[in-house]
Amino acid sequence: MDMSKYQQLFLNEAREHLKTMGALLIAQEQSPDERQGIDSLFREAHSIKGMAASMGYQRTAEMAHRLEDTKDLCRKAGRVPQAAIDRLMAGLDLLEGLVDDIAAGRPERETASFSAEPTPSPAEATAPAAEAASSSRAETAPPAPAGQEAEIEVALAEN
């Protein structure tokens, strides 16, 4: 089946999902414990993954899947730590680049660098002084238990 006639529809919908993900990530940064935002982020990545896979855009589907996995870790933890927000923003940039590649008729770029991106060590991620200095969230939301945030950091480093 010739899928090229659906390409513009894919591009329009993917860009809309990417725009929504960007806005949700910014909102999530302000409220890292907001469960509804975490779930919405997951659904946006899931939609892009499914659409890209249906169209045969393998690297785009894989990148969306990596973002989905990262968001799933945050869903399970019930919060999105700052390191995860930064990682998700970087992944969103890569995903936007993949969509741009498709729109320009170029081969999808390599996204292996996303999995190699360094993240803070678990000790850095849970240091109370670093958290208080880097964000006013320390005043408005209780931090996740140290083990929970460290678990997310380790899993992010492995993805």
Image (cartoon, grey):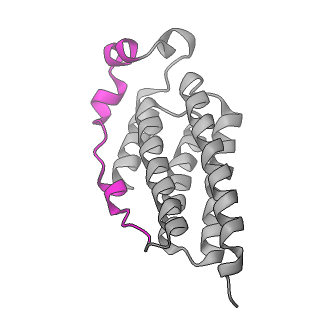
Q: Is residue 94 above or below residue 51?
A: above
Residue at screen point 54% across, 74% down? 57
- Residue 125 part of the magenta-drawn span: yes
37 relative to 131 in the view: left or right: right
Q: Is residue 55 above or below residue 42?
A: below
Q: Is residue 68 above or below residue 78?
A: below
Residue at screen point 68% across, 58% down? 12
Residue at screen point 32% across, 13% down? 129
57 relative to 11 in the view: left or right: left
| Image spot of residue 56 (x, y percent) | 58, 78
- Residue 114 part of the magenta-drawn span: yes
- Residue sitting at the far bottom: 1
Residue at screen point 63% across, 76% down? 55
Q: Which stretch is magenta?
A: 108-134
Main SS of the magenta part reads helix
Task: Identify which residue, 155 or 31, lies in the foreground.
Answer: 31
| Image spot of residue 100 (x, y percent) | 50, 60
Give the number of marks.
0
135 relative to 47 in the view: left or right: left
Residue 6: quadrant of the picture: bottom right
Task: Identify which residue, 159 or 117, lies in the foreground.
Answer: 117
Position of the C terminus by quadrant:
bottom left
